[in-house]
Amino acid sequence: MRYFWTFFWTFLLVQMLSYVVSSMTEGGVFNFMSGAIVSIGVTVLIIIASAVIPNEPAEKH
């Protein structure tokens, strides 16, 4: 379930970002599929980053 929600929120935020950036560029056209592909890539990167970051608290130095 956590992977679903990660993809869900990433998908929404990347689509929003794609829309805003395409609106700000001159002659830019919003492309749904490019946002969907980028959101899949970002979701994979988030899942990999969460697997690499350690869960244990840091030891005192």
Image (spheres, grey):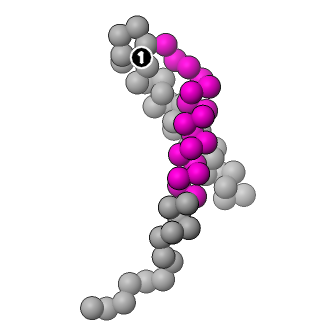
The front one of 22 and 9 is 22
Looking at the image, residue 10 sits to the left or right of residue 21; the answer is right
Q: Is 51 drawn above or below residue 43 in the view shown?
A: below
Secondary structure mostly seen in magenta is helix
Decide whether residue 35 is among the magenta residues.
Answer: yes
Amino acid carrying mark 1 in the image? Ser
Decide whether residue 42 is among the magenta residues.
Answer: yes
- Give neighbour class at mark 1: few <14, some 14-19, many 20+ (Cα, 10 Å): few
Where residue 43 sits in the image (x, y, percent)? 58, 48
Q: Residue at x 48, y 83 (%)?
A: 56
Q: Is residue 12 visible to us here?
A: no
Q: Is residue 13 visible to us here?
A: yes
Q: Is 34 drawn above or below residue 56 in the view shown?
A: above
The front one of 42 and 56 is 42
Please state the extent of the stretch shown in magenta in the rendering.
29-47
Give the image quarter of residue 57. Answer: bottom left
Q: Residue at x 69, y 51 (%)?
A: 4
Residue picked out by circle 1: 23
Looking at the image, residue 60 sits to the left or right of residue 10; the answer is left
Where residue 30 sits in the image (x, y, percent)? 52, 17
Q: Residue at x 55, y 36 (%)?
A: 38
Give the image quarter of residue 25. Answer: top left
Looking at the image, residue 54 sits to the left or right of residue 43; the answer is left
Quick one: which residue is furthest to the left in this view?
61
The image quadrant where one finds the C terminus is bottom left
The image quadrant where one finds the N terminus is bottom right
